[in-house]
Amino acid sequence: MATGYTLEIGYVSGYSSSLNRDQRWEAFENYARQLIETPAMLVDESNRLKTPRRADEKYLIEVAQTYALPVTEGGPLEFKEINGDRYIFIMCSSGGEYRLAKESIARAFCRLMIYHMHTLGIDVDITVA
C-alpha cells in the first residue's frame, strides 16, 4: 500500500498574515523548492528526531535527492492545481528500509514546511492517506 502526503495552505485569518492568496502560494512553493534543492535540510530534519526506527543514512540521502526529480523521472513530489486549488503531493511507496526512508523524508519535509510557513503567519493543512 502506498502512503501519500498532501500539503496545502490552511486557514489564514487577516490578523496573522496580510499576504493575498497568490502571495501565500508563492511563499509556499518557493520554500518547497528551496527544500527540494537542498536535500541536506531534509536529511538533517529527519535525523533531528531520534525515532525508534530510523532509516539508514544512505537511504535518507538517496531519497532526499530524488525530490529534485520530476515525477515523470521517479521524483516523489509534485506541485498540482485542481479546480483552482493548489497542492503539493508526495508519494511514499516502496518497501522495507527504503520505505522507512521515504516516509521519514516526507515527514521532515512536512515539518519544515509548517515551521517556515508559521513564521509567515500561515497555517498548513496536511492529509496523509
Image: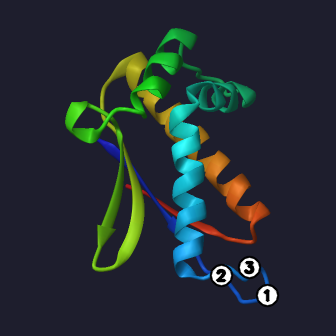
Contact (Cβ within 8 Å) of mark 3 with mark 2: yes
**Is residue 31 shown left or right of residue 82?**
right
Is residue 110 positioned above or below 64 on the image? below
Contact (Cβ within 8 Å) of mark 1 with mark 3: no
Frontmost residue, 117 versus 54: 117
Q: Quadrant of the C terminus?
A: bottom left
The 10 Å Cα crowd at callout 3, few under 14, some 14 to 19, many 20 or more, is some
The amino acid beneath tag 1 is Tyr
Q: Position of residue 77 (x, y in %)?
A: 38, 44
Frontmost residue, 50 versus 61: 61
Mark 3: secondary structure: loop
Q: Nearer the viewer, mark 3 or mark 2?
A: 3
Is residue 46 positioned above or below 116 on the image? above
Question: In the image, which disc is placed on residue 17?
Answer: 3
Q: Of the residues under marks 3 and 2, which one precedes in the sequence?
A: 2
Which residue of the protein is positioned furthest toward the left in this rendering? 72
The amino acid beneath tag 2 is Val
Frontmost residue, 19 versus 86: 19
Rendered residue at 36%/49% (across/down):
4
Quarter of image, res 66: top left
Q: Is residue 1 visible?
A: no
Rendered residue at 20%/38% (across/down):
72
Q: Position of residue 40 (x, y in %)?
A: 62, 24
Rendered residue at 60%/39% (across/down):
108
Is residue 46 positioned above or below 109 on the image? above
**Is residue 28 shown left or right of residue 112?**
left
Q: Which residue is mark 2?
A: 12
Distance from the alpha carbon under mark 2 to that under mark 1: 8 Å
Q: Is residue 46 visible?
A: yes
Q: Position of residue 57 (x, y in %)?
A: 57, 12
Q: Which residue is mark 1?
A: 15
